[in-house]
Image (cartoon, rainbow, N blue to C red):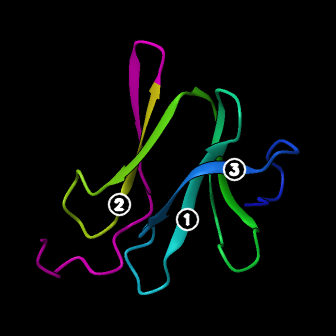
């Protein structure tokens, strides 16, 4: 998948992500063929929404906070990092899964 601003090889480990908690879903990916940056992008256009400088070996997407928005979990060497959307929830009273 060609993702704007990732290395010339594009992205891999592409995962659908409900980053905003709204109906529009985005995608998360890591740089292809190397341990590298992670990003969130619009799948239809390849436009980068957010980039996280990393040395990511693995990328996972899961709702660990329980607010209907999913987080990105990155495995980098012997470390695990979690990236989340720090904007206010768009559906604060919506029951979690």
When asked about the image quadrant of residue 36, the answer is top right
* Residue named by callout 3: 11
In this rendering, is residue 64 above or below 69?
Answer: above
Left or right, 94 with respect to 91, comes to left
Nearest the camera: 38 or 89?
Answer: 38
- The percent position of residue 17, horizontal first and vertical second, equals 45, 65
Q: Which residues make up the magenta segment?
A: 76-97
- Looking at the figure, which quarter contains the C terminus? bottom left
Nearest the camera: 61 or 49?
Answer: 61
* Residue named by callout 1: 27
- The percent position of residue 95, horizontal first and vertical second, equals 11, 78
Left or right, 32 with respect to 70, comes to right
Q: Secondary structure at mark 3?
A: strand
- Looking at the figure, which quarter contains the N terminus? bottom right
- From the image, give the main secondary structure of the stretch colored magenta: loop
Left or right, 73 with respect to 31, comes to left
For the point 49% across and 84% down, the residue is: 24
Nearest the camera: 21 or 2?
Answer: 2
């Amino acid at each position: 998948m060609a993702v704007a601003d990732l290395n010339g090889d594009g992205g891999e480990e592409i995962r659908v992500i409900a980053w905003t908690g709204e109906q529009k879903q985005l995608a998360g990916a890591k740089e292809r063929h190397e341990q590298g940056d992670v990003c969130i992008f619009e799948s239809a256009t390849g436009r980068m929404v957010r980039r996280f400088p990393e040395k990511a070996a693995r990328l996972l997407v899961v709702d660990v906070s329980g607010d209907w928005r999913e987080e990105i979990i990155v495995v980098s060497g012997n470390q695990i990092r979690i990236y989340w959307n720090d904007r206010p929830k768009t559906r604060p009273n919506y029951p979690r899964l």
